[in-house]
Image (cartoon, coloured by chain):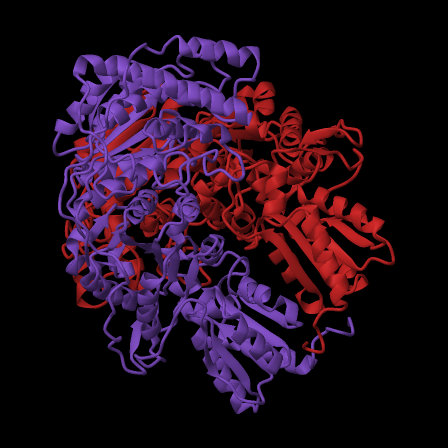
Chain colours: A red, B purple
Amino acid sequence: MINSPRLEVAVSVEESSRSALIPALQTIAARLRIESVRATSEAGSGHPSSCCSAADIVAALFFGHMRFDPTDPQWEDNDRFILSKGHAAPLLYAVWAEAGFVERSDLLRLRELECDLEGHPTPRLPFVDVATGSLGQGICAAIGLALNARRIGSDYRTYVMVGDGESAEGSVWEAAKVGECFALDNLCGITDVNGLGQSRSTQWGHDVDAYAARWRAFGWHALVVDGHDLQMILDALDEARQTSGRPTMIVARTLKGKGVPLMEGKNGCHGQAIKKGPDLDATLAALESQLVAGTLTPTIPPPPTRIIESASGSVGELPLPDYRLGDIVATREAYGTALAALGRVDPRVVALDADVGNSTFSEKFERVCPDRFYQTHIAEQVMVGAAMGLASRGAIPFPSTFACFLTRASDFVRMAGISGSNIKFAGSHAGVSIGEDGPSQMALEDLAMMRAVPGCAVFYPCDGVSAERIVAAAARHQGMTYIRTSRPKTEVIYAPTEEFDVGGSKVLRESESDVVTVVAAGVTVFEALAAYDHLRSEGISIRVIDAYSVQPVDTETLVSAGLQTGRQLITVEDHYSVGGLGDAVSEAVAHHGITVARLAVCEVPRSGKAAELLERYGISSSHIIAAVHRQVNAGAPTRADGS
Amino acid sequence: MINSPRLEVAVSVEESSRSALIPALQTIAARLRIESVRATSEAGSGHPSSCCSAADIVAALFFGHMRFDPTDPQWEDNDRFILSKGHAAPLLYAVWAEAGFVERSDLLRLRELECDLEGHPTPRLPFVDVATGSLGQGICAAIGLALNARRIGSDYRTYVMVGDGESAEGSVWEAAKVGECFALDNLCGITDVNGLGQSRSTQWGHDVDAYAARWRAFGWHALVVDGHDLQMILDALDEARQTSGRPTMIVARTLKGKGVPLMEGKNGCHGQAIKKGPDLDATLAALESQLVAGTLTPTIPPPPTRIIESASGSVGELPLPDYRLGDIVATREAYGTALAALGRVDPRVVALDADVGNSTFSEKFERVCPDRFYQTHIAEQVMVGAAMGLASRGAIPFPSTFACFLTRASDFVRMAGISGSNIKFAGSHAGVSIGEDGPSQMALEDLAMMRAVPGCAVFYPCDGVSAERIVAAAARHQGMTYIRTSRPKTEVIYAPTEEFDVGGSKVLRESESDVVTVVAAGVTVFEALAAYDHLRSEGISIRVIDAYSVQPVDTETLVSAGLQTGRQLITVEDHYSVGGLGDAVSEAVAHHGITVARLAVCEVPRSGKAAELLERYGISSSHIIAAVHRQVNAGAPTRADGS
């Protein structure tokens, strides 16, 4: 725990008088439009019309309402702003230039390779909490920011600007529901209803009441404003701040391209930069005429001073797993046990569930840390989106559900990867070993999905000890991790003191006469061990490796084993052959002349008993034995001789 | 075109009188509960409590309202029923046994490996249009079924049973929006509000008005009923049928486990089969007491007879692509051109868009076939879900969006794979070559996602000719396909008559002195060709292969090339290294002693110009040249000698 008292913000708190405020905001809004237009014209691409519809709202929010330290965008008590309609990025950059944080000259470097002012916002910029640009995600992250304020006891408020087009995304309504269920009155959305999407009118056009009715039906306080009437916007924001017990959605009627004669209210201008030359000159002249002479930029009030006790530093140590060799426990249950222990030792740890906590065993965490357990009900997108928001503010979120249902949030996982989110995903019920529930409940592509996130550490424990130790390793690791757990109970094969970390593996069986190495993970470790026993009775020795770290894999151990066992590896995994253990191992040993034979699920499976399915889909001990026999009978593989 | 007149259904159309109907339905509902309980007890797993809440509704629907031929569940004019809450599968199987299609004795084989009555419904059963079990998807598929009725000019109605828990999924509200926008008055949902989820109360418990208010806000006709009052249910279904201009949602208040004393209204009974023995005996006795003596099963009325002109057979031939060698065209634009041509020649072809038709060029299809172009706005889940429904009824759907946003529907793609859906996905703007828009808009994991669907044919054309020919190949292919297109314009390198099909490749450069083979696809084909030219000037020959079929890859050509070029392959792809071209090629040549070096994107990219990004992320011609130099300098790779 670090006790870091609030530093005094080095800006004056002198407030512009109310009457002077509106002209000042008008000037700021005009400047935001000018900068947005100019930057996109310079870049030759971008979305100026989407910036212009929202410029008045953003000006009012940043310079007439929000409380934050513009010199320190990451300050813990700052009001937060998420631009869910991320394509209006130039507007965001312009307002931070207006606030003094971004160099105004940098605005013209928009979208350049060496400039962090990217086409859509990413957290490479300190004032961006989560990457946006895949629509409907920012509002889910905003849920996480609002939950985080409660977690840390801060009064900061969260604002999120939502596009009308993106309101067609179901994730927006998942966020609506969760915002209602948690009564997040520290959250305020503003929907920029400019009526025009990329290719045509949006679903409800300029029918602002259609938007308001939906938000009201979802339990939010909703009010309709003219999104170009600064006083109305300010009044609505005040009303939102005074609304308790529920979040507020301000539905703002706007014009796309507002203030730009070439674009205002016209279809077909989405994602069109204005060409430099006469078009740009005329546009800038029109916008400059909207500047009000003699106005001063209002001072942004800092957040209230308070003593902050925030956790930081390394994650607390967990007690050793309480199993003996030979005990029987499901890795998903051990996951829950460790998660609860982690919750006890570190207040940053939070868990999110989509109504399967009694299957994933995150319910164990709920029992000990109910205030940090967030139930989204069956809504995986907002579960992951909220985790992104929480992670961006220093929480260590563990969202979990059935591994197959994490695919529901695949685009969120992708964006969390772009955000560099420190999220610890867990997916239970992996593979055909779940048995009778059938293919819809079997994750067979989750390893591919998670491995595709650059830098994501992917774990697949086989027993209770490794599962618990891996939960601790995941919490320690800075960056995204994924823990894949299994439904069936399995035997504990590791001593409680055994260590597991990113990039490791365990050689479970080895001798100098091993003819081949079998690389397994999770449930297939036990199939490999059974195959070992059987083959030994035939006088055949194999090496068995538990590749519990599927990404990164333990290249050194794999290469070494491969070279020592006839340059033959057999991978066996309860996953499709694409993107899983087999691919990971193959890539790792690619330059060492080692042949990798893969046993994996190769067709859509069906319901049945777990053991039957492992057999049917080719990943049981008998298939491993057969694969080893093939290698032994074939002798050295077709390598140098091309046969 | 085949003219197949309606066959007379071999059932009587004699109707039970209204007064006799209710007791008959009571008896059926009791039998449905009995069968659901008995089957799950026999299986030792399943969700009887979820069946019992919905039994009255299903009895009323199937035997008091719907029109279908129970001997031919696939008949084109049958009313359709989707069980979106797929875990109530035993109820579905029981009602089809009641209708005479399923052998009653088979019900007790629920969840057995060799029985098609799986844990959750799959289209292995003729009365299941799409696999359900991943919640919130069935109602999206129902949108597709309802759209299909319009496409074929049928009066059939579509019914979908939605769980209250699954109503938390955003996809449900995407479906709500699309149902409203298309004014689908041939669609009727029933929400089974039993108030209990898996681990706790659902988000709105038994507040049926909360559900109805949301559906009304989303433009549906909504009415509330007691889900155990058969007359109320029948009246509501009649009202739905008479409602025009909008879909209807019947919000039914029910009790989970209704009729089973051990479970009725109790939390903690989700997914619990009743143990055989005294518990089961008492339960069956209680349910049997609900049977009404002397009732007869009502006759199900067949759909009205009509002349059906449905398309079938092979897809019509397309004209040859209209490009000359050296023309410049983006593959995404060629995709649109071919799609429009396909729409002209085959009425089964439909296209779906999520408001990016002017980027993917599906707008070309819209211009020629506006009635078969379905705009879902920015809602990718319902776009894919509706495609599943359409495909299940014989349409050939081409849903398209930016490739990265297909990940938004990843779980739908997964379930479409389980359904064996004949969907032709297209994703544009693949990879870093999109340039300045930045990582949120770059698909770098789409190949992994689509390759993970067993049997999905994955194409990645590099020029206009191959793109057009591949659209035709995809349409011809029976089963799921994916076409990955690019944003930049590229040179046409193939003659219009060149043929492209599943599993093919093109050897673009070859000689007897090739030292290595470079395998490229899409934009990297041009990088490989540039590298070829450069290396040739240095006196180094390389083979260049366009692996336009990424799944299946052309194993024979790859192996042959590898063996002829020093057992060295270099793959280069505008995709992360996980699950893409490199993995596919590696697996294909794994047993031939060929080393595969991979060039792929290995970190989260940023905004910049396309050429800069190809260079920065290691997939440009200069990186290919460097990789070739490494091979040449190293001589034969570290293979047999282990060095």
> Which quadrant of the figure has residue A36?
bottom left
Q: Nearer the viewer, residue B51 or A133?
A: B51
Q: Is residue A596 left or right of residue A109?
A: right
Query: Total label count?
Result: 0
Q: Nearer the viewer, residue B43 or A236?
A: B43
Report the residue at 34% width, 16% height from top.
B254
> Which quadrant of the figure has residue A115?
bottom left
Q: Is residue B525 left or right of residue A543?
A: left
Report the residue at 57% width, 73% height from top.
B570
Q: Is residue B231 visible?
A: no
Q: Is residue A218 above or below residue B308?
A: above
Q: Is residue A2 above or below residue B266?
A: below
Image spot of residue B628 (x, y percent): 59, 79
Q: Is residue B554 above or below residue B448?
A: below
Q: Nearer the viewer, residue A99 or A630?
A: A630
Report the residue at 26% width, 61% height from top.
B361
Residue ranking furthest to the right? A512
Image spot of residue A478 (x, y percent): 62, 43
Q: Is residue A478 left or right of residue A567?
A: left
Q: Is residue B153 visible?
A: yes
Image spot of residue A411 (x, y percent): 43, 46
Instruction: Look at the image and tell me in which quarter the C terminus of chain B lies.
Output: bottom right
Q: Nearer the viewer, residue A300 or A327?
A: A327
Image spot of residue B67 (x, y percent): 21, 32
> Which quadrant of the figure has residue B105?
top left
Instruction: Look at the image and tell me in which quarter the N terminus of chain B lies.
Output: bottom left
